[in-house]
Amino acid sequence: MTELCSSGMNLAGYTRPSRLLLLLGLLGVCGGMACARGRPGTNPVVGVITPEYFRFRDVVADDDPSLPSGGWRAVCIHAQIKHGDSEARTVCKFEVGVPIRNMKQGEIPLEAARFAAASMANRAARMVLSQAHPGEMFAVLCTQFRGVYEPMLRTQIAGATVGECRTEGVEIVPFGITTASEPTP
C-alpha cells in the first residue's frame, strides 16, 4: 500500500465501481493529491497533479528561427510519496524538460506543454502506484515512475525528457508537500 498524500480512507469494503465513484469524488476532498491503497497490483490511485505545477523555465532560448528546432524548458518537481500504513514518506524528485520548438510539431505553446506534462505524469503515477507491492522501496517506485513517464510524455511532445533534477536555474516545485508556494489545484 503506497500513498501520495493520504486521504486516510479505507476503501477495502467498496466494490470496484463504487470505489471509482468514491475516488473520483475524493479528487476535490484530497485537494488534488493522489492516494494508492489496496492489494498489490490492484491499488486504486486517486488525485492529480495539475498543469499549474509545471512552471517551466526557459533554459535555452529559441533564438534561431532558421533552424528546424530550438529552445528548451524545464522544471523540477518534488512529489511526496507516503506509505499508507506506516506513515513512512519520501520525496520523488524528477525533472521534466520539453523543447520550445521541434521538427515534428513546430512551436509548442507553454500551456500545451504544461497540460501534456501533467496528463502523462498522472497516467504514469497511476500505472506505477497501482502495481506497487507492500514494502516496495520508494526509490524503486520513483525510478519506475520516471521510466514510465518519459516515453508517455514523448508520445505527446517529441524530444521531451524526464530524469533526475540536474538543470541549473529551473524552479523546484513541491507537490504534496505543504508549503506557502504550492499552487492550489
Image (cartoon, rainbow, N blue to C red):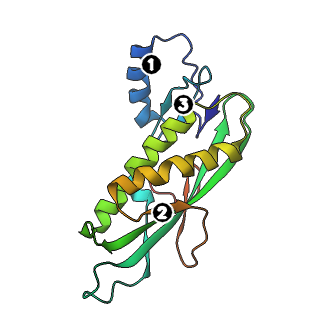
Image height of 88 relative to 72, above or below: above
Which amino acid is tagged 2? Thr
Which amino acid is tagged 3? Ser
Secondary element under disc 3, as helix, strand or loop, is helix
Q: Residues within 10 Å of mark 3 (few under 14, many from 20)?
A: many
Chain-order first, disc 1 or disc 2: 1
Q: Please tell me the numbered disc located at residue 130.
A: 3
Secondary element under disc 2, as helix, strand or loop, is strand
Q: Residue at x 61, y 19 (%)?
A: 39
Please provide percent x and percent y for residue 49.
45, 48
Q: CA distance from mark 3 to mark 1?
A: 14 Å
Q: Residue at x 42, y 49 (%)?
A: 152
Secondary element under disc 1, as helix, strand or loop, is helix
Please provide percent x and percent y for residue 22.
42, 22
* Residue 67 lies in quadrant: bottom left
Q: Is residue 23 visible?
A: yes
Which amino acid is tagged 1? Arg
The quarter of the picture where the N terminus appears is: top right
Image height of 6 relative to 63, above or below: above
Chain-order first, disc 3 or disc 1: 1
Q: Which residue is mark 1?
A: 19
Q: Residues within 10 Å of mark 2 (few under 14, many from 20)?
A: some
Q: CA distance from mark 3 to mark 2?
A: 23 Å
Determine whether label 3 and label 2 are within 8 Å by CB.
Answer: no
